[in-house]
Amino acid sequence: MKWSEKCIMELTHRNLFENDDHRARFRDLLDCYCDAPFFSKGLCKCMYLSSWDQKQFTQILDVLNEMILDRGNAMNLMMDNGMVLEQTARNEGDCTTVAILEVSKTFLDEVPYDRNRLKELEISDPETAYCIKRGLLAAQCIDDLPPVHPDAVLT
């Protein structure tokens, strides 16, 4: 069984998809990018969060397509795009996008998310806090899966 299928199955088994659209968007991203050389568990976690709604899905899809076309250091491109999106969201007062991008950055950097931010968010934006909580649960499930590219040669 492919890694992407194991991932979908595990997240489905744990009821971590909000609806069929969430699952379909996530599956589309995995099907397209799971075999890309830059794919990682951190990126998979970002895909889960970005699949939550159509706006976030479109944003990550645009970035992932750029990464495929760039063929250079794809993760630098993703981080750069994330910084631009975050600044734009801050300027527009889009707290939801800012919060999602902040947790996504921790996924890519493979560092723990500061749960103190989550406590603040539960008061100011409960819907986004819920999304992030579910993302953190999904992240744990993804971490528990076997390696993405077990046959890859480490350098």
Image (cartoon, rainbow, N blue to C red):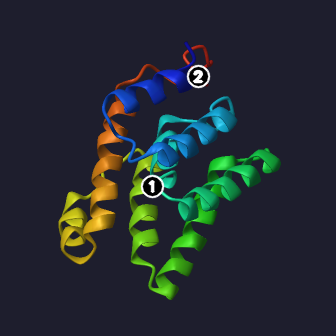
Place residue 36 in its image quadrant: top right
Q: Return the residue at label 2.
A: 154
Is residue 12 or residue 145 the one in the foreground? Answer: 12
Instruction: Give the image location of residue 132, x and y in percent.
Output: 33, 56
Describe the element under mark 2 as helix, strand or loop. loop
Q: Return the residue at label 1.
A: 104
Q: Is residue 135 left or right of residue 120?
A: right
Residue at 24%, 77% (x, y): give it.
Answer: 124
Place residue 128 in its image quadrant: bottom left
Residue at 45%, 79% (x, y): give it.
Answer: 94
Q: Is residue 76 left or right of residue 20?
A: right
Instruction: Give the image location of residue 95, x and y in percent.
Output: 40, 77
Instruction: Give the image location of residue 48, x and y in percent.
Output: 47, 45
Q: Is residue 58 left or right of residue 5?
A: right
Circles 1, 2 touching at the beta carbon (< 8 Å)? no
Above or below for 24 versus 114: above
- In the rendered image, the quadrant that contains the N terminus is top right
The type of residue carrying mark 1 is: Ser
Above or below for 72 versus 103: above
Is residue 113 or residue 28 the one in the foreground? Answer: 28
